[in-house]
Amino acid sequence: MSQEPSKVSPQAVIASGQKVLATESAALAQMAAELPADFAPVVELILGAKGRVIVSGIGKSGHIGRKIAATLASTGTPSYFVHCAEASHGDLGMVTPADICLLISNSGETTELQDILAHTRRFSIPTVAISSKPDSTLMKAADYRLCLPPAPEACSIGMAPTTSTTLTLALGDALAVALMDQRGFLPEDFRVFHPGGKLGAQLATVAQLMHTGDDLPLVTADTPMQDCLLTMTSKGFGIAAVVEADRLSGVISDGDLRRNMAQLMRATAGDIASKDPITVAPDELAASALAIMNARKISVLMVVDTTGAPVGILHIHDLLRAGVA
């Protein structure tokens, strides 16, 4: 900078930010209205690939390329980022004839891409180029061309990669989502690649968190309440599940005990149990089970299979420990 900045004007700062967002959003709208002609063929190419999508670029294009590769990999498309400069020093060995190369250069004349581009030509590796220059060296050499629309950079001097990187990033997202849609990618598939953190917890299934086997507080309808109370106490969930003909017929909760206190010791589990209890399937998302608990103001859910047989029990503490709640 040639001189010290003057006192900050909030209005000028806001106007600058709004101008950037308006410029970039207009470019995105332009690209959405007219996706590159090779967009659908590229999706078809990737769907049929036996190897990975190898993404490469340098500078800001490299940073965007890393994100595109990460998004593809996390949504069911095997992908890997190879730095084009490192590729020239041995990392070309990571690129195989079974792969597809996605090369990114706004100008299409990035010299660091020459070696990896030559490698793809030598071994007939399908190559997709992303650039804003349709007549550039990269675009002419590529098999598939994803040309960015002509749009000004959003910076005040028109040189810093801003609009172009936003467009490239959005185009990568569009490819990833189109591939997800074509593959029928489901939330449970997504969790396979996101097992950690809050996101992984939200995508956990009931089956992954529930208690099973001997932990279940199961009793029969003719079980005396004295024995039923022992089961409720020893299992530690605060309920007993009444099973008839291998199916869940009712649940006894603390509330049921209080409502039937006068006759409790003379009754059986079938006499006390609330019929048609609230249940959840093992393949439901744990977040859905939490929503049921919150809506019905309960802390425990029995898990039943398609025949109505009890296969597990889920406590709100299980959801808390997993980070769902």
Image: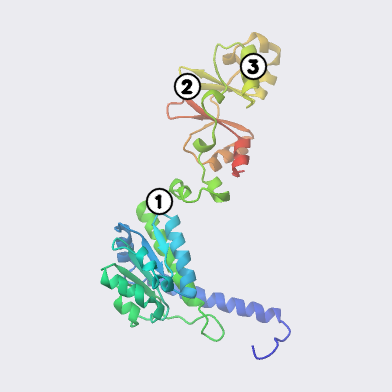
Q: Position of residue 32 (x, y in %)?
A: 42, 70
Q: Which residue is tagged 1?
A: 185
Residue that lies at the very extreme toward the bottom in this rendered image: 2
| Number of the front mark, 1 or 3 | 3
Q: Is residue 278 above or below residue 109?
A: above
Question: Dot 3: within a 10 Å radius of its alpha carbon, few (fewer than 14), some, or many (20 or more) residues?
Answer: few
Question: Dot 2: within a 10 Å radius of its alpha carbon, few (fewer than 14), some, or many (20 or more) residues?
Answer: some
The amino acid sitting under disc 3 is Leu
Q: Quadrant of the N terminus?
A: bottom right
Q: Between residues 193 and 8, which one lies in front from this camera angle?
A: 193
Q: Residue at x 35, y 65 (%)?
A: 93
Q: Residue at x 45, y 64 (%)?
A: 68
Q: CA distance from mark 2 to mark 1?
A: 33 Å
Marks 2 and 1, the one that precedes in the sequence: 1
Q: Secondary structure at mark 2?
A: strand
The amino acid sitting under disc 2 is Arg
Q: Position of residue 97 (x, y in %)?
A: 28, 63
Q: Position of residue 227 (x, y in %)?
A: 62, 13
Residue that lies at the very extreme toward the right in this rendered image: 7
Horizontal arrangement in the rendering, residue 318 relative to residue 58 (left or right): right
Q: So how many labels did they put on this image?
A: 3
Q: Is residue 238 above or below residue 11?
A: above
Q: Which residue is tagged 2?
A: 247
Marks 2 and 3, the one that precedes in the sequence: 3
Marks 1 and 3, the one that precedes in the sequence: 1
- The reply to whether dot 2 and dot 1 touch (C-beta < 8 Å) is no
Horizontal arrangement in the rendering, residue 288 relative to residue 173 (left or right): right
Q: Quadrant of the C terminus?
A: top right
Horizontal arrangement in the rendering, residue 291 relative to residue 54 (left or right): right
Q: Which residue is tagged 3?
A: 230
